[in-house]
């Protein structure tokens, strides 16, 4: 009888140990995202000045955008998109033991597949109303001055808590009042849109 108990106990501990080893060996490879995007909110900002926050980093000092009949220079306007992200529960693939004893996967955030930014008005001759403007815009996390082209940013984009700040790289052909639509498309196919209205963008 004792021999049977010893064999069963040994087998049980062996199975648990193997499950723990397998689940931790695959940690970060199984399970869904740890975070998901709930919503986005957009607001136009006026770039007031540049401030040094620590060598060699510098940030834009931004203020709420106020409409002006003369318009605001293209390089003094930014589009602030705030990401609302929340944590989600996860389970790992595999047996009962894998699900019960798995270690936490690496922290992952929802990833962007594409960003589309369009205007209700012609921005330039080759960018008529409705044309995607991301080719002539830069993005950064927070308000750091050093940004990167959106097309360069996309392959590495993970939507964390906080914001993305978009700026124009080239001037418009003429001063016009633009109504912008910003759409995020995630790798899982979900889409989020915000609308920024009444931006008078000048050269």
Image (cartoon, rainbow, N blue to C red):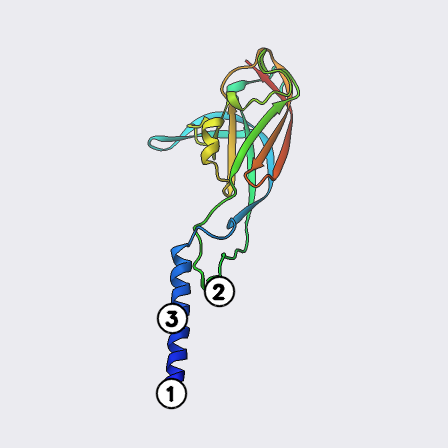
Residue beneath the point at 45% across and 49% down:
107
Please tell me whether mark 3 sits on a helix, a strand or a loop.
Answer: helix
Circles 2 and 3, Cβ within 8 Å, touching? The answer is no
Decide which of tag 2 and tag 3 comes sooner along the chain: 3
Please tell me whether mark 2 sits on a helix, a strand or a loop.
Answer: helix
Q: Classify 72 as above or below 10.
A: above
Q: Residues within 10 Å of mark 1 (few under 14, many from 20)?
A: few
| Residue 148 shows up from this direction | yes
Percent x, y for residue 200?
62, 19
Q: CA distance from mark 2 to mark 1?
A: 29 Å
Q: Which residue is mark 3?
A: 14
Q: Is 151 in front, or is 3?
A: 3
Q: Is 40 in front, or is 17?
A: 17
Q: Which residue is mark 1?
A: 2
Q: Which residue is mark 2?
A: 100
| Residue 67 shows up from this direction | no
């Amino acid at each position: 009888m004792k021999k049977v108990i010893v064999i069963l106990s040994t087998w049980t501990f062996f199975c648990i140990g193997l499950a723990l080893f397998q689940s931790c060996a695959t940690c970060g490879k199984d399970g869904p995202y740890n975070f998901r995007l709930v919503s986005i909110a957009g607001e136009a900002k006026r770039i007031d000045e540049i401030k040094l926050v620590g060598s060699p980093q510098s940030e834009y000092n931004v203020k709420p955008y106020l409409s002006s009949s003369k318009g605001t220079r293209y390089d003094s306007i930014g589009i602030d998109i705030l990401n609302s992200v929340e944590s989600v529960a996860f389970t790992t693939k595999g047996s009962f033991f894998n699900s019960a004893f798995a270690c936490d996967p690496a922290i992952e955030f929802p990833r962007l597949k594409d960003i589309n930014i369009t205007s209700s008005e012609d921005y330039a001759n080759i960018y008529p109303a409705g044309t995607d403007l991301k080719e002539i815009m830069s993005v950064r996390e927070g308000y750091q001055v050093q940004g990167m082209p959106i097309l360069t940013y996309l392959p590495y984009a993970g939507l964390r808590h906080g914001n993305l700040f978009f700026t124009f790289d080239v001037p418009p052909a003429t001063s016009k009042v633009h109504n912008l639509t910003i759409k995020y498309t995630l790798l899982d196919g979900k889409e989020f849109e915000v609308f920024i209205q009444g931006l008078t963008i000048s050269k």
